Image: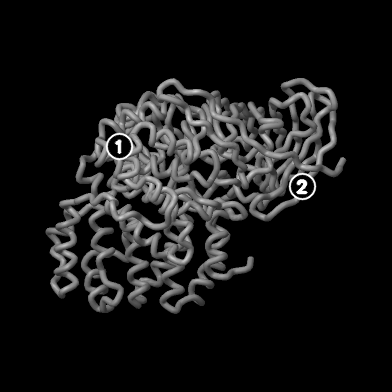
Amino acid sequence: MIKKLIFLSFIPFLMTSCDLFKSDPVIKPSFDPHSYAQPEEAVVKHLSWEANIRFDERFIDAIATWQVECKQESKHVVFDSDRLVINNVWVDGKQTEWNIVQQKDHLGTGLVVDLPKKHKYKVEVKIQYRTVSSAKALFWAVPQQTYGKVDPFMFSQSQAILARTWIPCQDSPGIRFTYDAKVTVPTGMMALMSAENPVEKSFNGVYRFRMEQPIPSYLMAIAVGDIEYRAIGPKTGVYAEPGLINEAANEFSELNEMMAAAEKLYGTYVWGKYDILVLPPSFPFGGMENPRLTFATPTIISGDKSLVSLVAHELAHSWSGNLVTNRTWDDFWLNEGFTVYFENRIMEEVKGKEYANMLANLGYSDLMEELENLKDSPDDTKLKLDLAGRNPDDGMTSIAYEKGFFLLKLLEVNWGRENLDNFLRSYFAQYKFKVMDTESFVSLLRQQLGDGPYTELRIDEWIYKPGVPSNIPKINSERFNKVDIVASNWNAGMALSPEVAKEWTTHEWLRFIEKIPGNTAVERLKELDDSYGLTNSGNAEILCAWLEKSLMAGYDEVLPSTQKFLYRVGRRKFLVPIYKALIASNKKNIALDIYKEARGSYHAVSTQTIDDLLGFNA
C-alpha cells in the first residue's frame, strides 16, 4: 500500500577508534548523494537471498530478507531500487506498508518500508520481488555471444550503483553487510557469486553461498552459465567455459606468485580463496574485484601472459577497496590509486623492476591523455571529486587510477619505500572492513608525515586541485628508452628491424604505436602492417592501439578488422577510443552502422557511454 513520506535528515555513522595511529580521525557527517539509504535511522547488516534465475524471460524471481539495525523511534527503513517489481514486503513476519519514491534516472527509486510503531532494535525486512529484463546490472548473453555457443550465460556488474537494479539494498559503498544465498538455475549450469563457491555443477541446479566478511553492495556479484573450474593452487583457481578453461588456467598460472607477493607486502589475504572467472566478451571492464571471485574479460588471454597485470590489479583490490573502501564515490581514488600502486609493486616482485617501470610509464601516458580529454572540465581532474547530481561512473577515469598512483609514488620517493609500506600495512590492518574518506585519510597522512613534509610535497594540491603538480615523479624505463630511439628512427624513414621487434613485449609495442605521429603516411603504416600483421593481432591491447592510430591516419584497410573487433569485444576501454577515432576520421556513419548491429552484445555500462558519444537513441 502506497503512502506519503517525509525524508529524515541524513548523517552516516562514524568510523570506530583506532590504536595503530596516534589518534583516529573523526569522519565528519557527510551525505552520500547516490543513495536514498538513511543508515543513521536504519542500516542493513545481513542479507539472506533466495533467487530463481529465469533465462527464458530474462529476469530473477527473488526474496531478499534483510536483518536491519534501527533506532527504536525510527519509522522507516529505506532501500535503493531501480525498476524492481516489488510484490510484497514483511517486517518481522507481518505484511507492512511500503512506498516508492521517484528520483533521477541514474539513482532509480527509494523503497521506503514502514516499521511498526513499536519495534525492536533489530528487525527483519523481507522483500519479495523480481527484476526486469532490462536491469542495467545484468547481462543475458545468448548462446552465440558465448565461447561455447551452446548455452546462454548471465552475469552482473554492480559497480557503481547498479546493485539496486537486481537487489533492493542500501546501495552505498559506505554500508557493509554479510550475506548468504540460495540460487536455483537450469540443470547443467553452474552459479557463482562473490562468496564461497562450488567447484562442480550441482545435479539439481540449486546452489548455496555464504559471504561471512561484510561487503558493500557494489561488490555483490552473480554469474550463471556452462562453467568449469580448474585449481591453480591451494587457495587460487580459475573458472571459465569448458572450451576456454585450459587457456585460462595457463594464462593465470602465476597467480600463486602474485598472491605471495601481495601478502608479503601488505599482510594476509583474509577472504579465504581467490578465484578468477573469465566472462563472455560483452563484459564491459577489464576486471571487477568481486571478493573471492574476480570477474575478468577474455581479452586479457593473450597466450603469453603479457596482460596479467590486470589480474594483479584485481588481486590488489582485496586490500585496497574491498578491505578498506571509499566512503562515497567522491573518494573513488582511495580505491583505485592505491590499487594501481599495489599492482605495480606486485608486478615488480613477480616480473622485475623494469617491467613495473614500463607499466608506470604507460600509466603516465594514460594520465596525460585523460588530462587533455578533461581540459574543459578541470574539476574532474581532482582526486577528491564532487559527483552530486551526476552518475558516479563519470568519476571513473584515469585520474583516480593514475593520478592516485603517482601521488603514492611521490610519497614512496620522498618518504621512503619502507616508511610508506609500514604506513599502508598498518592502514589496511587497522581499517579492514571499514570505510575511509579523503579528509580522514588526509588527517592520517599529515599525522604520519608531519606538517612540514606534508606541505612541502604539496599533498593538498594533488588531492584538491585540478591537473597534476609539477613534482610528479619521473620513472625511467630503459626498455622504453630503447623503443623511443627505434620509434624516432622509424618516424624518420628507417625500417623497423625484425630482430628488435621480435623481442618486444606487449608494452613495448604499445609504446612504439603511441609514438607514431598522427600524420604518418598511409603507405608507411601499410608497410609496418604487412611486416608485422598488426591489423590481425590476437592481442586486444595492441590491436586496439593500432586500430585507433590507423583510423586517425586514414589507413582505411583496417576497417574490416575494426568492424570485427567492435562486434566481438564489449570492453569499454577498447570501444570508446575506436568509436572516437571513427568519428574523428569522418566515419561517424560507419560507426553508427556498426553500433546498431553490435549494441545488443554490449553491457549497459558500455552502451550508456557509447549512446552519448554517438548521440544514439535506442
Spot the residue most to the front: 452
SS assignment at label 2: strand
As displayed, is residue 351 above or below residue 391?
above
The quarter holding residue 491 reads: bottom left
Q: Residue 282: image x %, image y %?
A: 50, 53
Residue identifier under label 1: 346
Of mark 2 and mark 1, the one earlier in the sequence is 2
Q: Residue 590: image x %, image y %?
A: 49, 75
Q: Residue at x 29, y 38 (%)?
A: 345
Comparing 400 with 223, the one in front is 400
Crowdedness near tag 1: few (<14), some (14–19) or many (≥20) residues, C-alpha within 10 Å: many
Q: Is residue 148 visible?
A: yes
Q: Residue at x 54, y 70 (%)?
A: 614
As displayed, is residue 517 above or below residue 503?
below
Q: Nearer the viewer, mark 2 or mark 1?
A: 2
Quadrant of the drawing holding the C terminus: bottom right
Comparing 203 with 292, the one in front is 292
Amino acid, disc 2: Val
Colouring convention used in this rendered image of the protein: one colour
Q: For residue 101, which numbered disc appears in the image?
A: 2
Q: Is residue 192 visible?
A: no
Quadrant of the drawing holding the N terminus: top right
